[in-house]
Image (cartoon, rainbow, N blue to C red):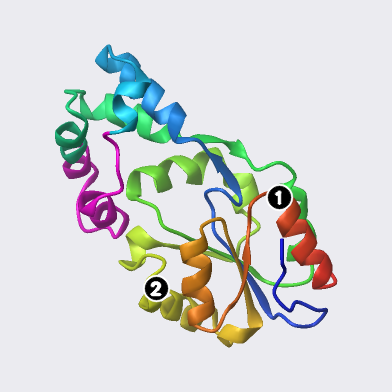
């Protein structure tokens, strides 16, 4: 990994994506659950599932879980109940990323930590309870479904930077998606592309944390 120019004292705040950075996510677990309920093979659903307009509207809090699940029925061609869709939808969470809790605990002693996630109301209700301990390291968690803005849109980063109250160039942002890293850098944030927890550890070390 090629780190951005991080150095001790370079940051006043750290901003973390959740899925793929703090929480391990696995869409295959979701598809397997739905397929079991539908009586088909997960492979039958892989090519049908996509992050379409309904998906994006759900992440912006503009449609309900029920409306999203109805969209999934149309997309996937399976007639599951809302509770069955919800079960599979929340099955995507596979635990904490290895070692991340210790890294966050260490970092929180030096700098304020924040999180910024593209997510939806159903997932928020689930992970807020299931992962309360690790999420407790964050002073505030910015959720696309609550603020009505999602990465990598410029306005989303601007909203979060203003709320944090730290200049963008003094915030280090961690995300696992290249498009979100590019979006953050375009708004002036320092950004680290996370492909494994080692990338977080390396960045914190570069910051002297």
Q: Which residue is mark 1?
A: 197
Q: CA distance from mark 2 to mark 1?
A: 25 Å
| Residue at image point 80% right, 73% down | 207
State if disc 1 and disc 2 touch (CB < 8 Å).
no
In the drawing, does residue 82 fall left or right of residue 190?
left
**Magenta region, residue range:** 48-69
Taking the magenta stretch, the answer to whether it contains residue 198 is: no
Q: Secondary structure at mark 1?
A: helix
Crowd around label 1: few <14 · some 14–19 · many ≥20 (10 Å): some
Q: Position of residue 191 (x, y in %)?
A: 61, 71
**Residue 166 in view here:** no
Q: Which disc is residue 156 wearing?
A: 2
- Report the label total: 2
| Residue at image point 27% right, 11% down | 39
Give the quarter of the figure containing the C terminus. bottom right
Q: Position of residue 28 (x, y in %)?
A: 45, 29
The answer to which of 21 and 178 lies nearer the viewer is: 178
Q: Position of residue 61 (x, y in %)?
A: 27, 57
The answer to which of 55 and 186 lies nearer the viewer is: 186
Q: Is residue 53 above or below residue 4?
A: above
- The answer to which quarter of the image holds residue 47 is top left
Q: Position of residue 103 (x, y in %)?
A: 76, 55
Instruction: Say which of marks 2 and 1 sits in front.
Output: 1
Q: Is residue 112 above or below residue 88?
A: below
**Residue 208 in view here:** yes
Taking the magenta stretch, the answer to whether it contains residue 62 is: yes
Give the quarter of the figure containing the N terminus. bottom right
- The answer to which quarter of the image holds residue 114 is bottom right
């Amino acid at each position: 990994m090629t780190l951005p120019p991080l150095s001790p004292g370079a940051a006043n705040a750290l901003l973390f994506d959740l899925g793929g950075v703090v929480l391990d996510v696995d869409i295959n677990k979701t598809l397997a659950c739905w397929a079991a309920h539908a009586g088909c093979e997960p492979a039958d659903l892989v090519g049908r599932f996509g992050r379409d307009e309904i998906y994006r509207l759900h992440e912006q809090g503009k449609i309900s879980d029920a409306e999203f699940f109805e969209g999934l029925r149309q997309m996937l061609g399976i007639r599951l109940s809302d509770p069955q869709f919800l079960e599979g939808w929340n099955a995507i969470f596979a635990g904490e990323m290895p070692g991340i809790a210790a890294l966050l605990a260490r970092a929180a002693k030096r700098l304020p930590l924040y999180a910024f996630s593209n997510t939806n109301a159903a997932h928020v209700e689930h992970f807020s309870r299931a992962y309360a301990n690790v999420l407790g390291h964050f002073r505030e968690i910015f959720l696309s479904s609550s603020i009505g803005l999602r990465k990598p849109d410029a306005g989303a980063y601007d909203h979060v930077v203003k709320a944090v109250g730290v200049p963008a160039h003094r915030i280090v942002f961690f995300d696992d998606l290249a498009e979100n890293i590019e979006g953050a850098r375009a708004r002036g944030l320092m950004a680290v592309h996370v492909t494994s927890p080692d990338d977080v550890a390396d960045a914190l070390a570069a910051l002297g944390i």
